[in-house]
Amino acid sequence: MTIRPILIHPDPRLKKLCDPVTELTDELRATAADMLETMYDAPGVGLAAPQVGVMQRMLVMDCIKDPEAKPRPMVLINPEVTWTSDETNTYEEGCLSIPEQYADVTRPAEVKVRWMDLEGAAQEEQFAGLWATCVQHEIDHLNGKLFIDYLTPLKRQLITRKMQKLKREKARL
Ligand code: K1U
Ligand code: ZN
Protein backbone atom coordinates (compact mmCIF):
# COMPACT_ATOMS: atom_id res chain seq x y z
CA MET A 1 0.00 0.00 0.00
CA THR A 2 1.15 3.52 -0.76
CA ILE A 3 0.40 6.93 0.66
CA ARG A 4 -0.56 9.01 -2.36
CA PRO A 5 -0.16 12.81 -2.65
CA ILE A 6 -3.42 14.71 -2.04
CA LEU A 7 -4.30 17.39 -4.61
CA ILE A 8 -4.55 20.89 -3.18
CA HIS A 9 -7.20 23.42 -4.29
CA PRO A 10 -7.20 25.09 -6.78
CA ASP A 11 -6.73 22.17 -9.17
CA PRO A 12 -8.97 21.57 -12.21
CA ARG A 13 -9.32 17.87 -11.28
CA LEU A 14 -11.13 18.88 -8.06
CA LYS A 15 -13.81 20.67 -10.12
CA LYS A 16 -14.66 17.78 -12.48
CA LEU A 17 -17.55 15.31 -12.47
CA CYS A 18 -16.11 11.83 -11.90
CA ASP A 19 -16.95 8.82 -14.08
CA PRO A 20 -18.97 5.86 -12.76
CA VAL A 21 -16.94 2.74 -11.99
CA THR A 22 -17.85 0.09 -14.59
CA GLU A 23 -15.47 -2.74 -13.61
CA LEU A 24 -14.03 -3.96 -10.30
CA THR A 25 -10.38 -4.41 -11.24
CA ASP A 26 -7.30 -5.19 -9.14
CA GLU A 27 -6.15 -1.65 -9.94
CA LEU A 28 -9.35 -0.23 -8.42
CA ARG A 29 -8.89 -2.42 -5.29
CA ALA A 30 -5.27 -1.22 -4.98
CA THR A 31 -6.45 2.40 -5.34
CA ALA A 32 -9.03 1.87 -2.55
CA ALA A 33 -6.36 0.40 -0.24
CA ASP A 34 -4.01 3.32 -1.01
CA MET A 35 -6.83 5.82 -0.38
CA LEU A 36 -7.55 4.31 3.06
CA GLU A 37 -3.87 4.42 3.97
CA THR A 38 -3.61 8.02 2.70
CA MET A 39 -6.74 9.02 4.70
CA TYR A 40 -5.51 7.47 7.98
CA ASP A 41 -2.06 9.01 7.49
CA ALA A 42 -3.39 12.55 6.82
CA PRO A 43 -5.25 12.13 9.24
CA GLY A 44 -8.79 12.44 7.91
CA VAL A 45 -12.15 10.72 8.26
CA GLY A 46 -12.86 10.57 4.52
CA LEU A 47 -11.20 10.80 1.11
CA ALA A 48 -12.62 10.84 -2.42
CA ALA A 49 -10.82 9.40 -5.46
CA PRO A 50 -10.39 12.76 -7.29
CA GLN A 51 -8.41 14.06 -4.28
CA VAL A 52 -5.67 11.61 -5.34
CA GLY A 53 -6.19 12.37 -9.05
CA VAL A 54 -8.34 9.30 -9.82
CA MET A 55 -11.44 10.56 -11.68
CA GLN A 56 -13.77 7.71 -10.70
CA ARG A 57 -16.78 7.57 -8.39
CA MET A 58 -15.22 5.97 -5.33
CA LEU A 59 -14.75 7.23 -1.77
CA VAL A 60 -13.40 5.89 1.49
CA MET A 61 -14.33 6.89 5.02
CA ASP A 62 -13.98 5.90 8.67
CA CYS A 63 -15.60 8.30 11.14
CA ILE A 64 -14.66 6.30 14.27
CA LYS A 65 -12.60 8.99 15.98
CA ASP A 66 -11.93 7.15 19.27
CA PRO A 67 -8.42 5.58 18.94
CA GLU A 68 -9.49 2.85 21.44
CA ALA A 69 -12.50 1.82 19.31
CA LYS A 70 -12.42 -0.73 16.47
CA PRO A 71 -11.90 1.05 13.12
CA ARG A 72 -14.58 0.82 10.41
CA PRO A 73 -12.86 1.39 7.05
CA MET A 74 -15.52 1.76 4.34
CA VAL A 75 -15.14 1.83 0.54
CA LEU A 76 -18.15 3.17 -1.39
CA ILE A 77 -18.29 2.73 -5.17
CA ASN A 78 -20.81 4.67 -7.28
CA PRO A 79 -22.55 6.05 -4.14
CA GLU A 80 -26.00 7.60 -4.53
CA VAL A 81 -28.03 9.49 -1.95
CA THR A 82 -31.49 7.87 -1.93
CA TRP A 83 -33.05 9.87 0.94
CA THR A 84 -32.27 13.00 2.96
CA SER A 85 -33.80 14.11 6.26
CA ASP A 86 -35.63 17.44 6.53
CA GLU A 87 -33.68 18.08 9.71
CA THR A 88 -30.34 19.77 9.07
CA ASN A 89 -27.04 19.84 10.91
CA THR A 90 -24.29 22.46 10.81
CA TYR A 91 -20.73 21.20 11.11
CA GLU A 92 -17.46 23.11 10.94
CA GLU A 93 -15.97 21.32 7.92
CA GLY A 94 -12.41 21.05 6.75
CA CYS A 95 -10.94 19.36 3.69
CA LEU A 96 -7.65 17.58 3.12
CA SER A 97 -7.46 19.41 -0.24
CA ILE A 98 -7.90 22.80 1.50
CA PRO A 99 -5.56 22.44 4.50
CA GLU A 100 -6.13 24.44 7.70
CA GLN A 101 -9.31 26.17 6.46
CA TYR A 102 -12.60 25.51 8.25
CA ALA A 103 -16.14 26.84 7.83
CA ASP A 104 -19.67 26.01 8.95
CA VAL A 105 -21.67 24.07 6.35
CA THR A 106 -25.34 23.12 6.78
CA ARG A 107 -26.46 19.80 5.29
CA PRO A 108 -29.23 17.22 5.89
CA ALA A 109 -28.64 15.67 9.33
CA GLU A 110 -29.27 12.12 8.05
CA VAL A 111 -28.94 10.54 4.61
CA LYS A 112 -29.55 7.12 3.14
CA VAL A 113 -26.87 6.10 0.64
CA ARG A 114 -26.77 3.19 -1.82
CA TRP A 115 -23.43 1.98 -3.22
CA MET A 116 -21.50 -1.02 -4.48
CA ASP A 117 -18.79 -2.59 -2.32
CA LEU A 118 -15.45 -4.00 -3.51
CA GLU A 119 -17.05 -7.45 -3.95
CA GLY A 120 -19.67 -5.98 -6.31
CA ALA A 121 -22.52 -6.31 -3.78
CA ALA A 122 -25.15 -3.57 -3.49
CA GLN A 123 -25.27 -1.91 -0.07
CA GLU A 124 -27.57 0.68 1.49
CA GLU A 125 -27.24 2.37 4.86
CA GLN A 126 -28.62 5.36 6.73
CA PHE A 127 -25.95 7.67 8.13
CA ALA A 128 -26.21 10.24 10.94
CA GLY A 129 -23.84 12.57 12.79
CA LEU A 130 -20.28 12.90 11.45
CA TRP A 131 -20.86 9.92 9.11
CA ALA A 132 -23.69 11.81 7.37
CA THR A 133 -21.64 15.00 7.04
CA CYS A 134 -18.62 13.07 5.78
CA VAL A 135 -20.42 10.97 3.17
CA GLN A 136 -22.12 14.10 1.75
CA HIS A 137 -18.79 15.98 1.68
CA GLU A 138 -17.16 13.05 -0.17
CA ILE A 139 -20.02 12.61 -2.68
CA ASP A 140 -19.73 16.35 -3.40
CA HIS A 141 -16.06 15.72 -4.32
CA LEU A 142 -17.22 13.13 -6.90
CA ASN A 143 -19.40 15.88 -8.43
CA GLY A 144 -16.59 18.46 -8.49
CA LYS A 145 -17.99 20.38 -5.52
CA LEU A 146 -15.94 21.59 -2.54
CA PHE A 147 -17.22 22.73 0.88
CA ILE A 148 -16.11 26.30 0.03
CA ASP A 149 -18.73 26.29 -2.76
CA TYR A 150 -21.33 26.62 0.05
CA LEU A 151 -19.70 29.86 1.28
CA THR A 152 -20.13 33.43 0.02
CA PRO A 153 -18.02 34.33 -3.06
CA LEU A 154 -15.91 36.64 -0.86
CA LYS A 155 -15.07 33.91 1.71
CA ARG A 156 -14.40 31.42 -1.11
CA GLN A 157 -12.06 33.87 -2.84
CA LEU A 158 -10.18 34.56 0.41
CA ILE A 159 -9.58 30.84 0.99
CA THR A 160 -8.63 30.24 -2.67
CA ARG A 161 -6.03 33.06 -2.50
CA LYS A 162 -4.56 31.52 0.69
CA MET A 163 -4.30 28.15 -1.06
CA GLN A 164 -2.65 29.71 -4.15
CA LYS A 165 -0.07 31.31 -1.83
CA LEU A 166 0.49 27.99 -0.02
CA LYS A 167 1.03 26.19 -3.34
CA ARG A 168 3.52 28.86 -4.52
CA GLU A 169 5.45 28.52 -1.23
CA LYS A 170 5.46 24.69 -1.47
CA ALA A 171 6.71 24.87 -5.09
CA ARG A 172 9.63 27.09 -4.02
CA LEU A 173 10.89 24.51 -1.43
O1 K1U B 1 -12.63 14.90 2.01
C1 K1U B 1 -11.79 15.30 2.78
O2 K1U B 1 -11.09 16.24 2.48
C2 K1U B 1 -11.63 14.65 4.13
C3 K1U B 1 -12.37 15.42 5.21
C4 K1U B 1 -13.79 14.87 5.30
C5 K1U B 1 -14.71 15.65 6.18
C6 K1U B 1 -15.44 14.98 7.09
C7 K1U B 1 -16.33 15.65 7.88
C8 K1U B 1 -16.48 16.98 7.80
C9 K1U B 1 -15.77 17.64 6.88
C10 K1U B 1 -14.87 16.98 6.07
C11 K1U B 1 -11.63 15.25 6.51
O3 K1U B 1 -11.37 14.18 6.96
S1 K1U B 1 -11.16 16.71 7.28
C12 K1U B 1 -10.31 16.12 8.73
C13 K1U B 1 -11.21 15.71 9.82
O4 K1U B 1 -12.39 16.01 9.78
C14 K1U B 1 -10.66 14.92 10.95
C15 K1U B 1 -9.35 14.59 11.02
C16 K1U B 1 -8.88 13.84 12.08
C17 K1U B 1 -9.72 13.44 13.07
C18 K1U B 1 -11.04 13.78 13.00
C19 K1U B 1 -11.52 14.52 11.93
ZN1 ZN C 1 -12.68 17.30 1.14
Image (cartoon, rainbow, N blue to C red):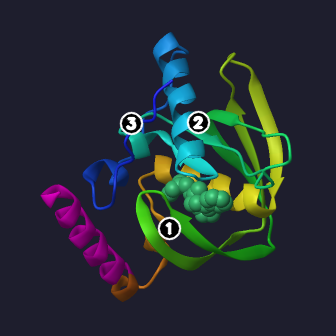
* Percent of width and height locating residue 165: 22, 72
Residue 157 drawn above or below residue 20? below
Q: Residue at x 17, y 56 (%)?
A: 171
Determine whether, in the image, residue 145 is placed left or right of residue 85. Answer: left
Q: Residue at x 45, y 33 (%)?
A: 56
Q: Which residues are magenta?
A: 156-173
| Mark toward the start of the polypeptide (1 vs 2) | 2
Residue 165 drawn above or below residue 25? below
Mark 2 → mark 3, Cα distance in angstroms? 16 Å
- The secondary element bearing badge 2 is classed as helix
The residue where tag 1 is placed is 147
Report the mark closest to the observer, 1 or 2: 2
In the image, 132 versus 64, the foreground residue is 64
Q: Quadrant of residue 88?
A: bottom right
Determine whether, in the image, residue 80 is placed left or right of residue 111. Answer: left
- The secondary element bearing badge 3 is classed as loop
Look at the image and say whether residue 130 sits in the magenta stretch.
no
Mark 3 → mark 1, Cα distance in angstroms? 18 Å
Residue 24 drawn above or below residue 96? above
Dominant secondary structure of the residues highlighted in magenta in the image: helix
What amino acid is labelled 2 in the image? Leu
- The secondary element bearing badge 1 is classed as helix
The residue where tag 2 is placed is 36
* Percent of width and height locating residue 8: 34, 56
